Amino acid sequence: MPRHFHEELEALQQTLLAMGGLVEDQIRGAMRALVERDDRLAQAVIDRDREVNSLDVEVDEKSVELLALYQPAAGDLRFLTTAMKIVTDLERIGDQAVNIAQRALELNQEPQLKPYIDLPRMAEKAQRMVKQSLDAFVTRDTALARRVCAEDSEVDSLKEQVFRELLTYMMADPKTIPRAIRLVLISRFLERVADHATNIAEMVVYMVESKFVRHALHSEGGSAPLPNLPPADGPGKAGARTVPPHPRGAA
């Protein structure tokens, strides 16, 4: 492949990582809006979703253009198809941030039902999974990708814990039901963020090892490799993530 093609792949990767940094910020902002009862911040998260959608379209269009112009094979082809799937998951993570911000706006109009403890813990774990899945994408680190997938069960457990606690509030006082249901929904949105991070991690394993590991990461031996597809040789296989991670303050 010509050098120009690999430069375009590198530029595409940087755009994808910029989108990843943006959605990490969106989740962090939405949770801050909830915990600090900040309506202005919640609305800013909702308004900023246009930037996420714009980057989604940009990556998709560029990927299709590169596929049509260069007709890549093997590792380069897997890189482009993985990028197109990752950008879809990132866009949906952005949607979950908007959902959280919208529920925060509603909850901020009423007295706080309870101290927020497990929801910020869920958000921190989900944000870390998103960051690590993108780090794994850049460094082609399948061990890190598999660790991300293993962490999904921790987020699921926290979601169940949140639901059980809120159920006791609803049973004790029906007047708490509207607020409790909104908090249950937020826990589900955070679970979906973790699910999308897991999807990204699974695609990293496919890109590097040519193995489909969806639904099979805990099976012995995983999936069989696809025929005639050597290991990935796309851009940045040994490089570090060039978009710096955002500092993670407590939500």
Image (tube, rainbow, N blue to C red):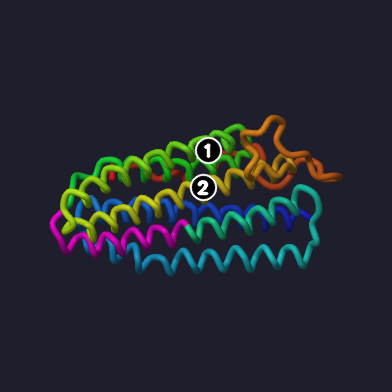
User: Magenta segment, which residues?
Assistant: 93-112
| Residue ID at (73%, 42%) | 211
**Which amino acid is tagged 2?**
Ala
Residue position for label 2? 197
- Element type at mark 2: helix
Measuring from the top left, give residue 78's x and y in whole percent.
Answer: 72, 51
What number is the disc on residue 148? 1
Which is more toward the observer, 210 or 41?
Answer: 210
Magenta portion: prevailing SS class: helix
Label 1 – label 2 distance at C-alpha: 8 Å
Residue placed most toward the observer, 7 or 182? 182
Quarter assignment of residue 30: bottom left
Residue 106 located within the stretch drawn in magenta: yes
The vertical placement of 137 against 91, above or below, is above
For label 1, the SS is helix
Q: Residue at x 29, y 57 (%)?
A: 181
From this viewpoint, is residue 3 visible?
yes
Dot 1 or dot 2: first in sequence order is 1
**Front residue of 10 and 193:** 193
Other-residue count near label 2 (Cα within 10 Å), few / some / many at <14 / 14–19 / ≥20: many
Residue 159 vs residue 84, the one in the foreground: 159
Q: Quadrant of the N terminus?
A: bottom right
Do labels 1 and 2 touch, CB within 8 Å?
Answer: yes
Query: Is residue 247 in sight in this rendering?
Result: no
Q: What is the quadrant of residue 198 in the picture? A: top right
